[in-house]
Image (spheres, grey):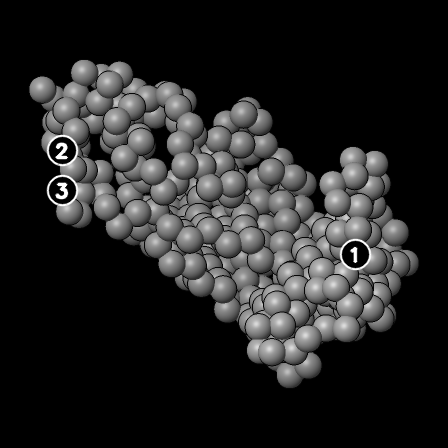
């Protein structure tokens, strides 16, 4: 990583890359060069996401303008491309301004940002420090960026963070009385009714409970730990997981649920996190059967059909639920 490269320089370069990719229209060589540039510094990925969002907004603005009766002097497509390119290449200022409006907070007056997702919604949100958050269903995050610390309060739900490296400002996720601290790494935090689950995909984080900092636990990439709630204050030892298991646990980031030996009841509970129509298991023994498969988070009916076929069961669809039972 080039630590001497300023945030503004990264933003400018990211804007240029967005315009270049737009012109290249799927050119594999350009895409490979982009990936190489993104991989050299974690801050660049966040800047690129913001520039992409700005590009999309500018494109939408040009469509709205045409719809309001304005006639461009040039062909619509070429005019839109040129307009966006000029705005993005103009020092990156326009790109940054539009991206700020998209993410919902104005850095000129505030360093706070609230991110909320509804039932079944999964959002991918770039943070202004160059970090990136994938936010799962029914999640509430409050992001506060200060000169000496970056804080994210996870009130409910689950999120995965790709943290921009900044040694002067640790990145701390707070969930109840549990704290997870990183500098430049990637990890997921999920708040449940029983406690907080932490899974690390890159680097190392520290996990502790407020008031018990002396017993903070370090969790490295490929491992996870669980901190019980106040009723069961347990800081479980970090458990190393296979990379495939980590990918499976975080498959929701791409809108999928992957099961490999999970019980039908466990799979149904996962689907119920994302959908208004709930899966109900009528027979407890059926709920203990094991499942293997990959499904979209918004397709509980596909899961039930597969389970019914594989387990010789019966599926009954009602207005608000799907009941899975033995014949």
Residue that protrudes farthest toward the right in the picture: 4
309 over 270 or under it: above or below = above
19 over 74 or under it: above or below = above
Q: Rounded to the nearest whole Å, what is the CA distance between mark 1 and mark 2?
A: 51 Å
Nearer to us in this view, 305 or 326: 305
- Of marks 3 and 1, the one in the foreground: 1
Q: Which mark is residue 316?
A: 2
Residue 136, position as x, y percentages in the image: 45, 50
Residue 215 is at least partly visible in this image = no
Q: Rounded to the nearest whole Å, what is the CA distance between mark 2 and mark 3?
A: 7 Å
Quadrant of the image occupied by residue 171? bottom right
Residue 5, position as x, y percentages in the image: 88, 59
Q: Rounded to the nearest whole Å, what is the CA distance between mark 3 and mark 1?
A: 49 Å
Question: What residue lies at 26% left-to-right and 23% top-to-bottom?
Answer: 307
Residue density around tag 1, few if under 14, some if 14–19, many if 20 or more, within 10 Å: many
Give left or right: position of 96 versus 316: right
Contact between marks 2 and 3 (CB within 8 A): the answer is yes
Question: What residue lies at 29% left-to-right and 23% top-to-bottom?
Answer: 306
Give left or right: position of 136 versus 265: right
Kindly identify which residue carries mark 3. Answer: 318
Residue 210, position as x, y percentages in the image: 48, 59
Give left or right: position of 111 versus 306: right
Kindly identify which residue carries mark 1. Answer: 19
Q: Quadrant of the C terminus?
A: top left
């Amino acid at each position: 990583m080039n630590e001497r490269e300023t945030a503004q320089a990264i933003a400018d370069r990211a804007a240029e890359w967005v315009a270049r990719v737009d012109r290249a229209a799927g050119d594999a060589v350009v895409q490979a060069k982009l990936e190489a540039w993104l991989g050299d510094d974690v801050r660049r990925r966040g800047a690129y996401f913001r520039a992409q969002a700005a590009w999309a907004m500018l494109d939408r603005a040009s469509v709205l303008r045409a719809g309001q009766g304005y006639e461009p002097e040039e062909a619509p497509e070429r005019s839109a491309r040129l307009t966006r390119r000029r705005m993005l290449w103009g020092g990156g200022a326009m790109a940054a301004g539009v991206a700020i409006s998209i993410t919902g907070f104005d850095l000129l007056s505030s360093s706070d940002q609230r991110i909320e997702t509804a039932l079944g919604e999964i959002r991918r949100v770039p943070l202004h420090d160059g970090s990136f958050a994938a936010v799962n269903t029914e999640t509430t995050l409050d992001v506060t960026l200060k000169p000496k610390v970056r804080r994210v309060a996870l009130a409910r739900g689950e999120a995965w963070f790709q943290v921009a490296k900044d040694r002067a400002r640790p990145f701390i996720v707070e969930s109840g009385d549990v704290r997870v601290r990183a500098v430049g790494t990637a990890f997921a935090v999920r708040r449940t009714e029983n406690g907080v689950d932490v899974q690390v995909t890159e680097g190392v984080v520290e996990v502790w409970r407020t008031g018990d900092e002396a017993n903070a636990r370090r969790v490295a990439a490929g491992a996870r730990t669980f901190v019980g709630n106040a009723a069961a204050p347990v800081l479980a030892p970090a458990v190393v997981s296979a990379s495939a298991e980590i990918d499976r646990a975080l498959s929701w980031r791409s809108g999928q649920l992957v099961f490999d030996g999970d019980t039908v009841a466990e799979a149904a509970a996962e689907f119920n996190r994302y959908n208004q129509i709930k899966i109900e298991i009528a027979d407890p023994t059926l709920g203990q059967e094991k499942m293997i498969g990959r499904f979209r988070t918004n397709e509980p009916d596909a899961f039930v059909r597969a389970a019914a076929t594989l387990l010789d069961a019966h599926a009954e669809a009602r207005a608000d639920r799907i009941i899975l039972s033995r014949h």
